Amino acid sequence: MVENKYKNLRLTNKVEEANCITHSGRFHVDDIISTIFLSKIMDNIILARVPSIEKIDIENKIVYDIGLGEFDHHQKNRNGKRDNGIFYSSIGLLWKKFGRVYLRKMRVKYLEKVFKYIDKELIQNIDAEDNMQFEFIENKITPNFVKLCNPKWNENISENEAFMNAIKLADGFWNVYINNAIAEVEGIEIVVEKISKCREPYIIFDTEMPYKKVIQKFIENKIKYIIYKSRREGYEVRTIGDTCKFKNELVGTRNIEDSKKVSGNNELIYVDNNGKLCCTETLESAIKLIKYNEDFE
């Protein structure tokens, strides 16, 4: 593959033919992810990486992370910030303007919820890191690995080749992350609807669902267990909240055979040492296990 081309993105040294401009030199997560995002909403990108846009005609070009314009954030007073205090970086500014356009193009079902989810869970973290607001990003998702593609002191690689290597990695990350975010939001909607109709202390799913982000809001509904078909075998039964655990007499058994005897459940497969997870062979035995733990038939 030619060094300066990847999918619908091409680098150029001829600024006059470029339709996008960003800064040259060391690249960061912000400009890499911004470039990937633009490649999702534009048919073709011809990108010039320059040290300055002074004396460059930028008409009809998207300029980002350089030049103090609409999609830059290096102005003295930055370029806006969210209510939570996180300043926008270039990807935040681009996402704010074009994110809904992108999701509409993808025909996302819950467009506004997905837009806000991605902004909160990914875009804001990149913004905060690039603006050195590290207090906002502890244990958060940011594709920091792209920075490792910058040329090393002992590496014979051009700046453009390193940039395109980072682009390839970021493209894979972006596609996986966006698909995950859409699935997460749609899954949450299913979980909320299921919970609203539940009359038992447990809810049942055909597969593992993203319940952890919403379930705490419904603990007052007396939902204490989640049952879903395991990706390995049988059914998993997980307890909800800090106070709900499987009985000590079950968790403290020496082996699975003793667990079966204690619970009277011959279809037990696994009992977690922390008392928060058990596995059974069938859905019926999963419900039976909950009834044992709750002391009701």
Image: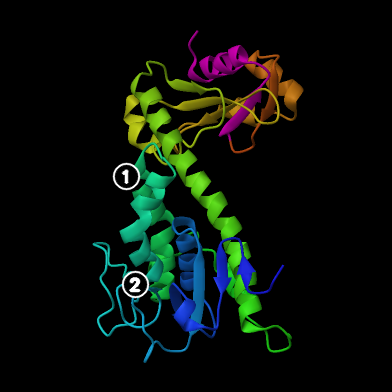
Amino acid on which disc 2 is placed: Phe
Looking at the rendered image, the disc whose residue lies closer to the viewer, 1 or 2, is 2
Amino acid on which disc 1 is placed: Glu
Where residue 47 sits in the image (x, y, percent)?
50, 74
Question: The residue tagged with tag 1: helix, strand or loop?
Answer: helix
In the image, is residue 92 above or below residue 222? below
Is residue 290 on the magenta stretch?
yes
Where residue 178 sits in the image (x, y, percent)?
49, 49
Where residue 60 sits in the image (x, y, percent)?
35, 72
- For the point 58% across and 67% down, the residue is 167
In the image, is residue 13 above or below residue 213? below
Quarter placement of the N terminus: bottom right
- Image colouring: rainbow
Residue identifier under label 2:
71
| Label 1, label 2: how far apart the Cα atoms are | 22 Å
Residue identifier under label 1:
112
- For the point 66% across and 77% down, the residue is 161
Where residue 161 is drawn, which disc sits there? none
Question: The residue tagged with tag 2: helix, strand or loop?
Answer: loop
- For the point 52% across and 45% down, the residue is 179
Dot 1 surroundings within 10 Å: few (below 14), some, or many (20 or more)?
Answer: few
Where residue 148 sits in the image (x, y, percent)?
63, 74
State the count of labels.
2
Q: Which residues are magenta?
A: 275-297
- Sequence order check: which comes first, mark 1 or mark 2? 2
Residue that sits furthest to the bottom in the current view: 55
Is residue 41 on the magenta stretch?
no
Taking the image as shown, residue 218 lies to the left or right of residue 211, namely left
Question: In which quarter of the view is residue 99 placed?
Answer: bottom left
| CB within 8 Å, label 1 to label 2 | no
Res 222 visible = no
Taking the image as shown, residue 226 lies to the left or right of residue 153, namely left
